[in-house]
Image (cartoon, rainbow, N blue to C red):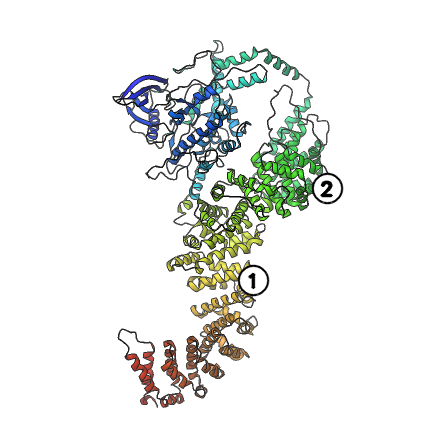
Amino acid sequence: MEKYHVLEMIGEGSFGRVYKGRRKYSAQVVALKFIPKLGRSEKELRNLQREIEIMRGLRHPNIVHMLDSFETDKEVVVVTDYAEGELFQILEDDGKLPEDQVQAIAAQLVSALYYLHSHRILHRDMKPQNILLAKGGGIKLCDFGFARAMSTNTMVLTSIKGTPLYMSPELVEERPYDHTADLWSVGCILYELAVGTPPFYTTSIFQLVNLILKDPVRWPPTISPCFKNFLQGLLTKDPRQRLSWPDLLYHPFIAGRVTIITEPAGPDLGTPFTSRLPPELQVLKDQQAHLLAPKGNRSRILRQACKHMAEEAKQKQKHQNTGPALEQEDRTVNVVSGMTPLPRLRAAPQEPGLLAGVMASEMKSSWTELGAGEAPPAPRENQHTQDGEQTFPGPRPEAAGQPTTDVVDLENEELDSDDEWRHLLEASKPTPIQLKAPLTLLCNPDFCQRIQSQLQEAGGQQCWYGTFSRDLMAVIQAYFACTFNLERSQTDDSLPVFQEAASLFLDMLGKLLSQPDDSRQTLRRDSVMCFTVLCEAMDGNSCTISKAFYSSLLTTQRAVLDGLLHGLTTPQPPLHTPPGAPQVSQPLREQGEDLPGAISSALAAICIAPLGLPGCWEAKEQISRHLADQLTEDNNQLRPSLVSGLQHPILCLHLLKVLYSCCHVSEHLCRLLGQEPLALESLLMLVQGKVKVVDWEESTEVTLYLLSLLVLRLQDLPPGMQELGSEIAALFTRSHVVSLVSAAACLLGQLGQQGVTFDLQPVEWIPATTHALSAPAEVRLTPPDGCGFYDGLLILLLQLLTQQGKASLIWDVVSSEMWTVLWHRFFMALRLPKEVSTQEEELSLSSPRRSSSEPDWMLISPQGVAALLSVAVVTFTQEPQLCLSHLSQRGSSLMSTLKHLLSPSFLQQLGHAPHGSEFLPVVVLSVCQLLCFPFALDVDADLLVGILADLTDSEVTAYLLQVCCYHLPLSQVELPISLLTHLALRDLTCLNQFVNTVAASPRTIVSFLSVALLGDQPLLTSDLLSLLAHTARVLSPSHLSFIQELLAGSDESYRPLRSLLGHPDNSVRARTYGLLGHLLQHSVALRGALQSQAGLLNLLLLGLGDKDPAVRRSASFAVGNTAYQAGPLGPALAAAVPSMTQLLGDPQAGIRRNAVSALGNLGPEGLGEELLQYEVPQRLLEMACRDPQPDVKEAALIALRSLRQEPSIHQVLVSLGASEKLALLSLGNQLLPHSSPRPASAKHCRKLIHLLRPTHST
């Protein structure tokens, strides 16, 4: 305390006192808060210490700075900035603020929250009372009593903190929540600043919970579209769809205005809330949320409220004779003088009177409605104008003692939710002024006159059976909604009874819909709503039950369907308000509030196919076809009725669904709608937001899909859609509802294919796509023509990447977060089995391993799979090195996905999927094209070894052969066989996989290989011959029987071999001779065939004179191996000597070497005379001495050593002076420098000289 001068007290509450002060020896004005330790529990002091620890590390211009903190014997003292006032006070005085001021405050609030969330801190009590005014007009966020710094292991929280008026739906429902709860509160604050009241405002905690969970936000007409869109994003009830980081920073309402503080790198706190979670952490977060989700259905808030009300009733009964005693509420030091105002709902749950003053707004509206003139203003609860108790709210004293705050657990300490709700309910007690409010109203003559008028109207007599019938209908509806009616959960005879009850109800409904005497329509409305519930129950039942139910609507229960259609086309009188009910304003009513709304909802229920429940699809399609037939009739009023209802706020959504289902089955209806000006105008107005509907998001989504279907079926643009591109593009980039983004992408893809241009900047659409792929997918409607939820997004992405002049765009895409998210989303949608890898080990451990289950075709259809792979091919073609980095990353989502797409299990699932067989070849060929990249590039050897090992471990070679054999037409197997050949030539394990796969299904695969070999695709035939030749060269003879079978044919006439030897393609002939050369080393059967099959040997020898060098080379190799140990075949090979001798002068060294070796093999077979006839020894000796190629010299010397065994040839060699000539050759080798390696022919040369000496001549 010796550092500060204490000047004056500026606030006081249950926490303690706040003084204005000044730091000694300076002009710095501060706020000193003195918090007594006496009477506080250990828990309270730990919470206080946690708050101090959180604030100590915060340094941001829009957050109150804690300058100092210390303890005395009796108090904890906290020193903070001194604030000039409160934002709450401005609201108190001015009611609301201009939008430009709200915009400035919004940017500062977002700046403060960005700073907190980047440090993984949740505020959890955002409200106007906790926003202070600084010098210069800035704001500062205070009160970190409920703040929580989350560890890296904590993804969601469950403890209930905050102020009910600003609580998010997930908090109210006590579901796990994250940082998006703070963002909801910001939306509430900004709404209140602009409108004057919070978005959800009532006197009852019961009503408040229901409003927050169910009620839409009411938007005043004065709010700008940009601000409205910003608030809509923040006030989205689903936290997964709520506007959040990092997209929040780029919203036009605050873009460029947010201050981001960069700090030096500190300890790793984990992924900040301001960054999008990696896919594996998102999965972990979803699992935590699921585990922590409450098991009960009823909110603890409401349970506590009911308990509190019961206790109050008991207390009231106990003190009934003595009368109630109104307690005076505690007041703070700054009290506004004058008459006591109507209190307003106070926003601090830890202070008394939390809901005090809620009646103020209600009374004001009542005065206005009753015509009593302007009600007196309802100023808010008095607040401190300085930095008072808002910065550090103090809990109530509980126990004596003076514990210290030194040692606390800052991570795990949390206040009990029950305590907080107890404070809330205590604060909900009516204040004296609230109890006086009813008396004030009763003293107003206008109010009394209005009540009297209502009572007179309520006094009319009613038929007794009306209410009874409606009550009975409610019971029937509840019965139909019970889950025990489902086949999977039936007990005893519950299912037959349910079916019988449904049939009886349909009998009754058909008669009831034709009754004209229900003037108030309520019974028919309730009956139709009950029918809708019955349809939902039938959707969840088995195919047999649901199909029979819906089929009956076209046969025995046709009266129900006709009655619904008649009710939709017949004008209905307005629904009367029940007597005695208050006359309220006419907001957008909920579904089923009147008869047309109930009928349109019922028609949608019998047409729309439920997601994931295919049992009733066929029957519903028949109903849609029946409706489509009526909609296309010339004189039928059904189509005009549906079209006119598209601009009705209640009917719109349901009629859109009906039209969407009918257009799916009727191209004629699509053409009629495309020519209907009113229908197109209504659809375009819905997309543009010019029609006020109950659920704009879902209505817009159905509209976008309906327009996509029209374009798809008509293959043309209906009038007016040419100018729609920019609006759909804006919807795609700015909406935060994933299903809406997906629908917009679907339509943009169709528009792009029709030549419509739209300006999509990468800085906008890449984050939008990333958000759509990373956020949970909530499919509400099947996209057109059986497409998947993400198909439109992928098709649009492919269009964007293939635009002319957009090459640089590809690098922007692959270097963004979107690329990783894209493949992870695809990985999850296909439901691939998890592979344990270094990169995804955490994900595998945190997620249960799944078998190869059916892919989620609702998320990505076969067409979407093909589109995604096309995106990858386009991308990797432009950036091939990126392909290598992905394929070489063992266990990556991309590599795992590509391998799985070739597996038999997936291809079987793909073939059975809708349109799967159509896209299966595209999928396989795209995968093969991607896997071929490493073999087409100059790749580091180690990198290629790693890729090969990964493919080998997954048995991709076997997959490729099975794909070609079972799934692809012959015209499309060329690329997979080429890839298979590359793998087998490079890796022995791959080759063994190929042979083992053949052995597993020899008949089927040999038949396929035979057809492929003899087909009209030379490249395919060449690759197969190379594969078979490599097999014969590397593997043992026991694995070669299938090759012999392929060449011999089913009748062993060797017709396939003859055809291949005479093939017009040079490469095919060359590789056939090469295959023969390897087989003849081992195959006795093939040698016998050359002897026994007429003309087969001649075909072999014919290749020696082929005009193509490659063929001559392979043929000479084959003849040489035939001559080796030719046995009975030897004499027949005499015909080869002339051609072989001629090849000794061939310009290609390889051909000369093969010819030399072949002639050397013919010597021991008794063909010495033929060899001497063509002067073979002379030619060989000349080549041994003079051929420029060392390997040819070596082959000639080896051949001479073999031929000299024939006496006649030996004599010829001696007579030619072979020893002397070879001696000169040997001498030349010896004169080489010692550093030069000796040629391999030198050894053979010396040996031959030795053998040709006279001593060996006899």
Q: Is residue 209 magenta?
A: no
Residue 469 locus on image (x, y percent): 66, 26
Q: Nearer the viewer, mark 2 or mark 1?
A: 2
Q: Which residues are magenta?
A: 260-272
Answer few, some or many: residues within 10 Å of disc 2's Cα (few below 14, many 20 plus, some between 14 and 19).
Answer: few
Instruction: Inspect the image, locate mark 2, and give the three-letter code of the amino acid beneath it.
Output: Glu
Q: Which residue is mark 1?
A: 970
Q: Is residue 262 magenta?
A: yes
Is residue 368 toward the left or the right of residue 630 in the image?
Answer: left
Q: Which secondary structure class fits the magenta region best?
A: loop
Residue 233 locus on image (x, y percent): 50, 34
Which residue is at the far top? Answer: 322
Q: Which residue is mark 2?
A: 633
Please say if 967 is above or below 58: below
Which residue is at the far right? Answer: 635
Instruction: Inspect the image, locate mark 1, and give the three-letter code of the amino acid beneath it.
Output: Leu
Residue 278 locus on image (x, y percent): 42, 43
Please say if 773 is above or below 161: below
What whole-number distance in Å separates the C-alpha atoms at marks 2 and 1? 47 Å
In this orientation, does residue 664 appear? yes
Of the pair 675 and 582, the residue shown nearer to us: 675
